[in-house]
Structures are given as C-alpha cells and as structure tokens.
Amino acid sequence: MSKVNGIYAATLSILNDDLSLNINRTIDHAENVIELGCHGVVFFGSTGQSQLISLSEKIQLINNLPNSKNKEKFIIGTGLNSLGDTINLMKIAMTNNFNRFLIMPPAYYKYGDNDVMQFYSKIVDTLPESEIILYNFEKLSGYKFSKECVEKLVEKFPKQIIGVKDSSYNLFEELKLENFSVMPGSESKLLKGLNLGCTGIITATTNVTASLARRVYDDFINKVDQTQNQKLCDVRLIFEKYNLISGLHSFLSDKNLDFKNLLPPLHLLDEKEKKELNSALSEIGFDIKTLKAA
C-alpha cells in the first residue's frame, strides 16, 4: 500500500448523441487531463455522472482501461448504491489489475456511523486486496463521515482503507492518520490542505485547471513562492456558481462538441449562464484557448 499523492481529476464521462458512453473518448479525455498536469484521474466519480451511467457501460470502460499508457494512474469510482453491484464491479476491475477505488456510502437512506462501518466491512471482507478511498460528500449521499468513524475504519482495515476524499470539508483540517491520504474536493482547499499535511486533491474542476493545480502543488513541494494559487482558487469559485458538471461540459464544448451531451436530468448551462461563465473566466485570464487540445 502507498499513499495517494498529488492532483487528481474526477474525470468527465463523454457521451454519444444517443447518450451511450463513448468509451474511447472518455479514456482519451482522462489521458489528456494527465498530460495537462494531473498525477491521475478517478473514473466514475460524481463528476463523471456515475450514478446515471449503466453498470454494463462501466464494465465496458473498465475492460478497456488496461490498454491505456496511463493505467497505473487510474482510480475507479463505483457510484453504486447496491452493495452487491459495488462488489461485482470491483471484482471486474481487479481482474484488470485495478485495485484502488473511490467509494461513497449509498445515497437516499438514513444511517449512522455503525451502519457505514458495516457497509465497508462487507466490501473489505469480500475483497481484502482492494484499496479504498472513502468519499465524504454529505450533499450527495446524505451521510457525513465523522472523524471517529474514519479512525475506526482505518484501525480495523489499515491496509484497505487508504484515504478519504473530503468534499464535506469537516475532516481535512483535523484528521491526522499515519500512512493515510486526506484529499479535499476543491482547489480552494489545496494549499491550505498541503500545509496541514493533506496529500493533494481530487476535484471536478481539475478537468480544466490541471496545469494550474499542478503548479501550485509542485511549488509547495519545491518550497518556492506561490504565484498561481489565487488564480486557481478564483477559477474554482467561478465554476462553483453553477452546477459543476454543467459548467465544465459547457465550457469544454466550446472547444470540442464531444462534451455537449449530458444524461438527464443534467443539462448544459443556458446561453446566458454560459456567457456569464466565459466572461468571468476571461476577466481573470483563464480561457478555453489556453488548454491543449483534448
């Protein structure tokens, strides 16, 4: 087991006009994000429309991932409420030599820490070779990890529970565990988190801020003056005014129509919102033309 360090994108899923998953273009985009500066990507996080994409399409993509030159840099999100489906998807990923996963507790139902302990225990007992990053995002799952719950899980499964993506932001300032990765879910928390001992970030907007975020990370590691952190945070704050998935797909679709499709009930920004987004980004010197071709 090794810690997860660096800048990770919750990579976008690209859809065909019939709303089926475009396997090759989704992988191409993930590879491009890595080329732009990310240390790796997470497939099928919330930004990748994971809850809306069929299990069969997820399996198809996972079966194609071993062909990628960046396969060592991939983490698999499950995005499934069913314990059985989660375990089965993980089994398929592990037969393809992917054993690192981002897993959120099931959405919709009300439960507490003991129930979450049972959920992850079932997974680890079945798949003891897996490595799991907990996904803490109360806004989506309805559950917020407590510091105590994470500590108990790590104590019980020190080889399997290897980190947490903290998108509820109640953990990254206080959680201090040996050989455990704490990664906030926003670029605005990157520098503060690194100073507190966090190991990096996993975020939606690193689909477009990869090079900026990598510069901030590298400058911190190399102990040089920060020159890009404010711009990085400003870009994030602008995107946060909108649904992040809608904003990212709308922004990127100006360059590449591959990004124009979203699964209902998600949708692109309307023309007024899109104009406001692009104008705000241009005002701080962040433009689609500055990104490399996807």
Image (cartoon, helix red, strand yellow):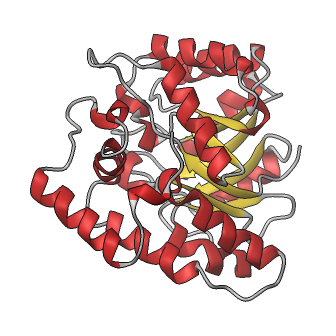
Front-lying residue, 261 or 5: 261
Image position, residue 162 (x, y; %): 77, 48
Residue 87 in which image quadrant = top right
Q: Can the viewer see residue 197 in this picture?
A: no
Picture residue at 26% right of the left edge, 60% below the top: 242
Q: Quadrant of residue 115?
A: top right
Q: Residue furthest bottom?
A: 225
Q: Position of residue 268 (x, y in %)?
A: 21, 43
Quadrant for the N terminus in the image: top right
Residue for point 66% across, 28% down: 122
Determine whether 115 is above or below 155 in the image.
above
Which quadrant of the structure image shows residue 116?
A: top right
Q: Nearer the viewer, residue 229 or 242?
A: 229
Classify residue 174 as left or right of residue 256: right
Q: How many marks?
A: 0
The answer to whether residue 229 is left or right of residue 220 is left
Q: x%, y% of residue 30?
A: 58, 37
User: Can residue 58 be seen at all in this image of the molecule?
Assistant: yes
Q: Is residue 17 above or below residue 142?
A: above
Residue at image x 67%, y 46%? Answer: 35
Q: Is residue 67 left or right of residue 207?
A: right
In the rendered image, residue 11, in percent from the top left (x then y), is placed at: 52, 41
